[in-house]
Image (cartoon, rainbow, N blue to C red):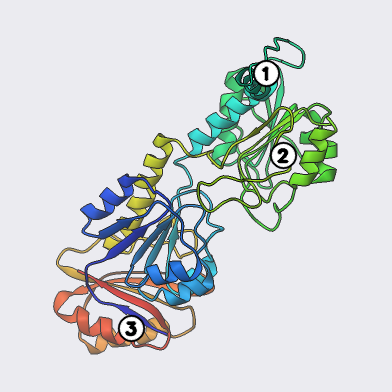
Amino acid sequence: MTAVDEPKKLRALLLEGISPVARDLLAAEGLEVELLPKALQGDELAAKLEGVHLLGIRSKTHVTREVLARAADLVVLGCFCIGTNQVDLEAAKAGGVPVFNAPFSNTRSVAELILSEVIALSRRLGDFSRDVHLGRWKKSAAGSHEVRGKTLGIVGYGHIGSQVGVLAEAVGMRVLFFDITPKLPMGNNRPVASLPELFGESDFVTLHVPATPQTKEMIGERELAAMRPGACLLNASRGNVVVIPALARALAEMRLAGAAIDVYPEEPGGNSDGFESELRGLSNVILTPHVGGSTEEAQEAIGREVGSSLARFLASGATTHAVNFPQVELPKTPAAHRILNVHQNVPGVLRDINRIVSDANANIEAQVLATDPQVGYLVMDLARHLSAEVHEKVAALPTSIRTRILD
């Protein structure tokens, strides 16, 4: 099916309490913006997307193939977080919808949380605080240690993992890391050849990996058994990376000295009571409600980063940094209209489009085409008096997925 988007007042829907910075940025670009504090799912989300051109979400809203099939007006989607596994990226691409995220903006906030938890676990601060809140005075040095001279093992040395390494080294820790691709070490951080090597040498292991089939339940009984006796595990990456019952057993049997967990296999859709986990009540275990990137500074930066990407796409068609789309960014040509065409990547498409342009006796002021194995994305600037005719005919091609015109 070909989707044709005529010039109109564009509407944006921002869910899950996205920073007002994003709302203000998009409103300044002329969009009508609705900001809601909660996630939406399934039929409720699909119904809400009627007439919506831009959708912004965080981690709790799931944009499925079925939802996308009903979102005929949607032209772009923003994940105001690092992860995009809550979106069916292939279905979005097949519908001509690029997806943007925020790979950098909450890096510092997550890294600071991890370092603070390493120190808190080493000093057993969670247990001491709970006891004093309950009126118990149990002053003791047993089981409390400085982190200076201890070894931190980082699994996944991307934006966050490398920043954690920098902070840990600054407080005197020895830092090792393992990644499946070669990475440039920061400072004196040192790569190791395998996970077992990292587990065997680390007093603390922190996880910073994406959600992939390879990382699902990558930390289970065998991996926990390979860790040093008395080590601590931290996870602020994805909830399905750690097998929680296995971790609970290792902690209850005191094979591990502690853990800090911020993400879980199943999480509530919003703030509520009654959260359950096998880790609740265990000694020296810090449990937080997926707040790794939840600082005011990070949320403002994320709102600005993703909001700017979305605004740039709507204004010029730029897909630089989209996670599921061919990468295109072309400076706008003065006094021209811009046609954006997403099409099936099959032979003959550009020939057919060029024939339409030639038959209209139009001159292409600027043009760029980028493809991946599934789709092609064409950005083309034409004289204004011919753009409407070309737009209509390009959109009618059987290979066209989505065609827009910008003035």
Mark yes or no: residue 194 visible.
Answer: no
Q: Mark 1 points at which residue?
A: 123
Question: Mark 2 against mark 1, which lies toward the viewer?
Answer: 2
Lower sequence index among marks 2 and 1: 1
Q: Which amino acid does label 2 sit on?
A: Leu
Identify the element where label 1 is drawn. Answer: helix
Specify the quadrant that holds the N terminus: bottom left
Q: What residue type is labelled 1?
A: Arg
Furthest-front residue in this view: 135
Q: What residue type is labelled 3?
A: Ala
Q: Name the residue under label 3.
A: 395
Q: Give 190 or 240, whichever is nearer the viewer.
A: 240
Q: Distance between the residues labelled 2 and 1?
A: 19 Å
Q: Position of residue 357 (x, y in %)?
A: 27, 83
Q: Mark 2 points at which residue?
A: 279
Mark yes or no: residue 288 visible.
Answer: yes
Q: Distance between the residues labelled 3 and 2?
A: 55 Å
Question: Mark 3 against mark 1, which lies toward the viewer?
Answer: 1
Q: Where is residue 100 in the image (x, y as percent from the top left)?
A: 43, 57
Lower sequence index among marks 3 and 1: 1
Q: Which residue is drawn at 45% across and 48% down?
A: 102
Question: Mark 3 against mark 2, which lies toward the viewer?
Answer: 2
Q: How far apart are marks 3 and 1 (CA)?
A: 64 Å
Q: Quadrant of residue 337?
A: bottom left
In the depicted structure, whether residue 233 falls above or below residue 244: above
Identify the element where label 2 is drawn. Answer: loop
